[in-house]
Image: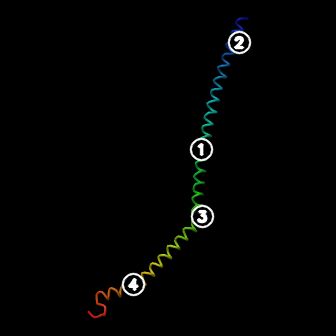
Amino acid sequence: MAFEVIKNIVEAEKEAENIKLSAADKAAQIKADAQKKAEEIIRNAALQAKAERAKMVETAVEQSQSEVDGIIKEAEAKCAQVVSDAQSRKDIAVKAVIRKVVGTDGDS
């Protein structure tokens, strides 16, 4: 009878050890699976963030295009005004140079 009890205890200890090993293997597998899933989630989030950033930049460029066009139009108008002013003052400057070089009466 004592032999039977010892045999049952030994078998129970073996079974407990097997259960512990199996549980440790399952825990390691669960941890590895969780790590892979976490890496995949992070990778997907990074890709999504990159795509969202590109979309936001594109939207910002589109929204600012009318403002840029306005600035360009304003700059072109100012440039045209500067050219016009320069043209109108060119005659005055040429006459002033001629008066200085030739003289006020035009006879030097």
Q: Choose between 14 and 24: the one closer to the eye.
A: 24
* Residue at 29% in and 90% down: 103
Confirm or deny contact between disc 1 and disc 2 (CB under 8 A): no
Alpha-carbon span between mark 3 and mark 2: 80 Å
Whether residue 89 is situated above or below residue 27 in the rendered picture? below
First of labels 1, 3 by sequence position:
1
Q: Find the distance from the CA under tag 3 to the CA under tag 4.
A: 42 Å
| Residue at (36, 84) in percent of width and height | 93
Q: Which residue is mark 3?
A: 63
Label 1 is placed on what type of residue?
Answer: Ile
Q: Is residue 6 above or below residue 32?
A: above
Amino acid found under the numbered disc labelled 4:
Lys
Residue 32: percent from the left, percent from the top?
60, 35
Viewer-side residue, 103 vs 84? 103
Residue on which disc 1 sits = 42
At 39% from the left and 84% from the top, the residue drawn is 90
Say if mark 1 contacts mark 3, CB within 8 Å: no
Label 1, label 3: how far apart the Cα atoms are? 31 Å
Q: Quadrant of residue 12?
A: top right
Left or right? Give the position of 5 relative to 69. Answer: right
Q: Secondary structure at mark 1?
A: helix
Q: CA distance from mark 2 to mark 4?
A: 117 Å
**What is the number of the mark on residue 99?**
none
Q: Residue at x 69, y 9 (%)?
A: 6
